[in-house]
Amino acid sequence: MPELPDVEVYRRYLDATALHQTIERIEVKHQRVLATTPQKLGTNITGHEFEATRRHGKYLLACADDVWLVLHFGMTGQLRYFESPDQEPDHDRLLFHFANGHYLAYDCQRLLGEVDMIDEPRQLIEAKELGPDALSLDFEGFQACLAARRGAIKTSLMNQQILAGIGNVYSDEILFQARLHPKTKVNELDPGARHAVFEALHDVLTTAIDCQADPNQFPASYIIPRRESGAPCPDCEGTIQQITFSGRNAYYCPACQRKP
DNA sequence: AGTACCACCTGACGGC
DNA sequence: TGCCGTCAGGTGGTAC
């Protein structure tokens, strides 16, 4: 589930593989993921090259001369750079052909991702009304984001309009590391707890990026590899529990993360 | 402002 | 063997 760390790993992957190569052709394999038209993509990007990338929350941006390609990965999106056609991934929806004969695929099994083209990165932030990128915040900025909030902390962390980049999976990890119950009300967090959430947010996101967003490489103290009802808690004798709210699953340890 | 619930979408998985 | 219901969780919409 591509959240901030996954998308940052994709960004570095694109930087390491596909920068500064002339794009000869863009093959649209599935129209549904395109928020723009194949014609506009072709006109503005064919013949150019990706020069630089950025990321805001779960969005990856790639600059090609005068335009920015915007990639969102939905639940199942990923990037694949490959050298010969037989390495083409199963669900590529957009395929960039480079002049050197290599390819970059935007692969998205469930078609919930979206690719768009804009003139300036700020257009993305305005259009989607995104909050600041979660990793760009200092503690003051983080506090400002939470200032007017009264609902459950997990809901606020996952709200892209408040701060961008955190989804269901990483919000569970942040709250586990901060030892806070997911339903704790934001307005009931004391300054110490706010600090704990901020520290956990920063630690978890940077650690996950360092681990290539691969749960197999995460520290043993992490709950993400155990997001399963009845799994052992990494920190106590308790077991992980699942609760549903607003239609999604939250996993937590009832012993470590007490009820508010 | 918050919360609940639905839809989009595909493939994996369990039950029969 | 194969059909069916359920689930995964990002975003966005509606209703209360």
Image (cartoon, coloured by chain):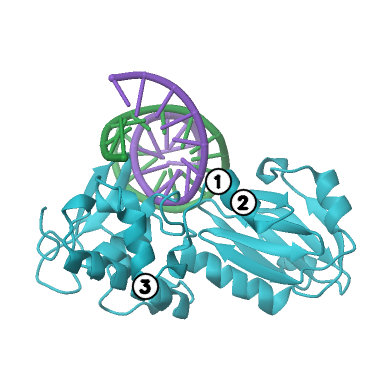
Chain colours: A cyan, B green, C purple
Which chain letter goes with mark 3?
A
Q: Amino acid at mark 3?
A: His
Number of marks in the image? 3
- In this view, the residue in front, A134 or A250, is A134
Q: Secondary structure at mark 1?
A: helix
Q: Say which residue appears at 70% left-offset and 56% top-offset.
A: A120
Mark 2 vs mark 1: tell me if same chain: yes
Q: Amino acid at mark 1?
A: Lys
Q: Amino acid at mark 2?
A: Leu
**Where residue A128 is drawn, which disc sits there?**
1
Q: Say which residue appears at 16% left-offset and 74% top-offset.
A: A235
Q: Which residue is mark 3?
A: A202
Mark 2 vs mark 3: tell me if same chain: yes
Which chain letter goes with mark 1?
A
**Relative horizontal placement of residue B14, taking residue A237 as reference (left or right):** right
Q: CA distance from mark 3 to mark 1?
A: 23 Å
Q: Earlier in the sequence, mark 2 or mark 3?
A: 2
Mark 3 vs mark 1: tell me if same chain: yes
**Where residue A124 is drawn, which disc sits there?**
2
Residue A50 pos. (x, y %): 77, 68
- From this view, report whether residue A40 is shown above or below residue A132: above
Q: Say which residue appears at 42% left-offset and 56% top-offset.
A: A163
- In this view, the residue in front, A81 or A162, is A162
Judge the density around disc 3: few (<14), some (14-19), many (≥20) Cα neighbours within 10 Å.
some
Asked whether residue A70 appears in the rendered view, the answer is yes
Q: Quadrant of residue A72?
A: bottom right
